[in-house]
Image: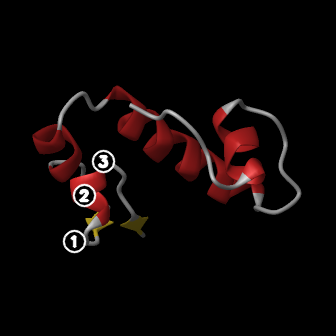
């Protein structure tokens, strides 16, 4: 579940508002992936998401995660 956004433009994409930072086709893909992240309810759900590589770090212990495309 998404609790907050570090980047305001990413938050705009999630809220289906136009972002000048990202191209329109990238915004559609990003929205789809953000919705998948938001629907995940547990760590195994997150690890099973296709097309997202998770960085293993101490952040996992603290409860926050970094993802890379």
Placement of 64 over or under 36, stated as above or below: below
Q: Check whether the beta carbons of the residues at disc 3 and disc 2 lie within 8 A of each other.
A: yes
Residue 51 appears in the picture as rendered: no
Label 2 Cα neighbours within 10 Å, binned few <14 / some 14-19 / many ≥20 = few
Instruction: Using a 10 Å C-alpha cutoff, classify the residue at mark 1 as few (fewer than 14 neighbours), some (14 to 19) or many (20 or more).
Output: few
Colouring mode (rainbow / by chain / secondary structure / one colour): secondary structure
Residue 11 at x, y = what percent?
Answer: 69, 42
Q: Residue at x 28, y 68 (%)?
A: 53
- Looking at the rendered image, the quarter that the N terminus falls into is top left
Residue 63 percent location from the top left of the image:
30, 47
Side of 39 relative to 22 (left or right): left
Q: What residue sits right under mark 3 in the picture?
A: 63
Q: Residue at the spot x=39%, y=63% of the render?
A: 66
Q: Secondary structure at mark 2?
A: helix
**Circle 1 sits in a helix, a strand or a loop, which is it?**
loop
Can you identify the residue that label 2 sits on?
60
């Amino acid at each position: 579940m998404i609790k907050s956004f570090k980047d305001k433009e990413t938050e705009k994409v999630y809220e289906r508002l136009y972002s000048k930072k990202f191209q329109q086709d990238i915004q559609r893909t990003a929205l789809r992936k953000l919705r998948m992240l938001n629907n995940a309810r547990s760590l195994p759900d997150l690890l099973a998401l296709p097309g997202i590589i998770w960085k293993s770090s101490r952040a996992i212990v603290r409860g926050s995660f970094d993802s890379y495309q």
